[in-house]
Image (cartoon, helix red, strand yellow):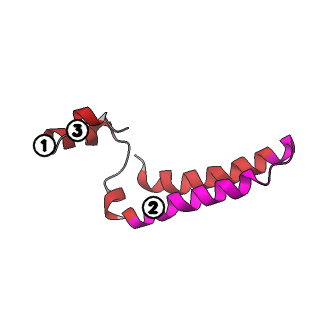
Amino acid sequence: RRPPRSTLSSSSAASDVYKRQSEARPSIWDEFDEFTRLSKDLAETSILLAGSIDSIDDLRPALRGVSSGCKACHSRYRE
């Protein structure tokens, strides 16, 4: 979780605050293109799966699809 903008500055103290409050691994910055790709994939998949829900029975498979997209990123970049 990122602190409110008013608490951020260019100082190293602000950077330390962000690092303490973030659940992201430092590798997210080294692999930011991959992180962005995974994020876009999740968004696209979510949109497609949302369109596939016609009844309550369709909800579980759609949520599994979205969940796997979440896991792809969280398992790699979240502490």
Looking at the image, which residue is at 25% across and 33% down?
A: 6
Q: Answer left or right for 19 relative to 41.
A: left
State which tag comes first along the sequence, 1 or 2: 1
Q: Answer left or right for 77 relative to 60.
A: left
> Marks 3 and 1, Cα distance to the nearest angstrom?
8 Å
Residue corresponding to mark 2: 36
Residue corresponding to mark 3: 8
Looking at the image, which residue is at 32% across and 59% down?
A: 29
For badge 1, the amino acid type reads Ser
Q: Position of residue 25 (x, y in %)?
A: 35, 51
Q: Answer left or right for 58 relative to 21.
A: right
Does the segment drawn in magenta span residue 6? no
Does the segment drawn in magenta span residue 44? yes
> Marks 2 and 3, Cα distance to the nearest angstrom?
23 Å
For badge 2, the amino acid type reads Thr
Looking at the image, which residue is at 31% across and 33% down?
A: 4
Using the image, determine if residue 55 lies above or below residue 76: above
For badge 3, the amino acid type reads Leu
Q: Which mark is residue 59?
A: none
Q: Position of residue 14 (x, y in %)?
A: 19, 39
> Marks 1 and 2, Cα distance to the nearest angstrom?
26 Å
Looking at the image, which residue is at 53% across and 60% down?
A: 40
